[in-house]
Amino acid sequence: QSKARGRNTVTLFSPEIGAQFERRTAVAQALHRALEESSFELHLQPKFDVREGIRLIGAEALLRLTDAELGPISPAEFIPVAEVDGLVSAIDLEVMRLAGTMMADWAARGIRLPLAVNINATTLDEPGHADLAERLLRVGLDPEQVTVELTETGLAAPGLRQRRNLERLRDVGYKIAIDDFGTGQSALGVLQSLPVAEIKIDRSFVRGLEGPEPGRARALMRAILAMAGALGLRAIAEGVETEAQFSILKEEGCPAMQGFLLGRPLGLRSFEARYLAEEPRPRAVALAGI
Ligand code: C2E
Ligand code: MG
Ligand code: MG
Ligand code: MG
């Protein structure tokens, strides 16, 4: 180490940091390419009402990128890169465009299924997107059918433009969901001041139900559900992976769920074949093993 430092008094570089930097640069380039070539794709994950049986109530659009050189890159990796590089709004617009095209195609085929799209809170704050509701309408996203999911991060201290955008979305009829609810700095502040219709209870709370302190986790889940009920918010638990989690959530009266146990994100054609085949309307889905 000290030898490697040699005559430099300060070491600014380590191999790991170098590799991380290279990866970020490569991911940023992949994002630019994907935007230029419109090669992003949307996958869909089903959402279910579980109060009586298990009923499909909608889908969440999740962005997928497969780069010619880097292969598949997860949004968990590329969204943070896009945030830093100022690409996230361009990506959000691309997602809206793709979702609008998909919904127009569904409408033409007589398919009606509520759709949730993820939008970054920074996109609500771009001077160029002062009226995001207008954009959503223009790409053909029907307010009756569309929920906008936003994470609390970035909404902790909503600025005027963000607030106006959210209110306008609400007024036009879009539903607003708080994603990863409970993980931000101001979970409750967001509910106090913004027009929210749904909370998506973060996967960490679901995982806790089988963690080292299941009693506490269960009490916490119960409290979150009671709060949602009292405020008239729709609640959905995300990241439900096991039957044990499913049963506990059901016992606690959790009305809706999403997760690998009930359905993984699928490419559009696979999703359609599995959930929308034959009947034009979403039907109750019978799931093996539950
Ligand atoms: P999110 O909106 O909370 O989406 C849920 C993520 O959890 C997805 O990962 C999904 O595949 C994963 N997931 C679903 N069920 C389970 C489960 O049972 N277990 C586990 N371990 N994971 C589950 P994905 O697709 O990698 O997305 C990660 C995050 O990237 C999303 O979290 C969202 O914040 C962001 N993202 C995805 N698509 C978009 C997009 O189109 N625009 C923006 N701005 N962000 C997006
Ligand atoms: Mg989401
Ligand atoms: Mg989520
Ligand atoms: Mg999440």
Image: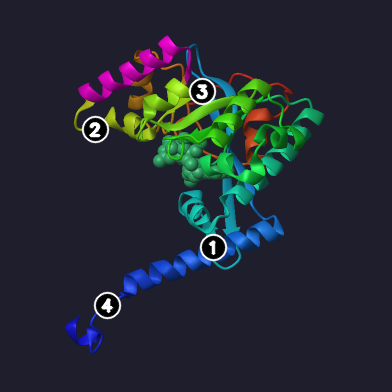
Residue bounds of the magenta highlight: 215-234
Label 3: how many Cα within 10 Å (few below 14, some 14–19, many 20+) = many
Nearer-the-camera pick, 210 or 95: 95
Label 4 – label 2 distance at C-alpha: 41 Å
Residue kind at label 4, given as amino acid type = Thr
The colour scheme of the drawn protein is rainbow
Mark 2 or 1, nearer chain start: 1
The label on residue 237 is none
Q: Which mark is on residue 28?
A: 1
Q: Tag 2 or tag 4, which sits nearer the N-term?
A: 4
Say which residue label 2 marks.
211
C-alpha distance separating marks 2 and 1: 37 Å
Q: Counting residues from the N terminus, which is met first, the one under dot 4 or under dot 1?
A: 4
Amino acid type at image mark 2: Gly
Q: Element at badge 2?
A: loop
Say what secondary structure mark 1 lies in.
Answer: helix
Q: Is mark 4 within 8 Å of ligand 1?
A: no
Q: Residue at x 50, y 14 (%)?
A: 53
- Return the residue at label 3: 196
Mark-to-mark CA distance, 3 and 2: 30 Å
Q: Which is nearer the N-term, disc 3 or disc 2? A: 3
Identity of the residue drawn at 46% across and 25% down: 199
- Numbered disc 3: secondary structure: loop
Q: How far is mark 4 from mark 1, CA to CA?
A: 26 Å
Which of pointers 1 and 3 lies earlier in the amino acid sequence? 1
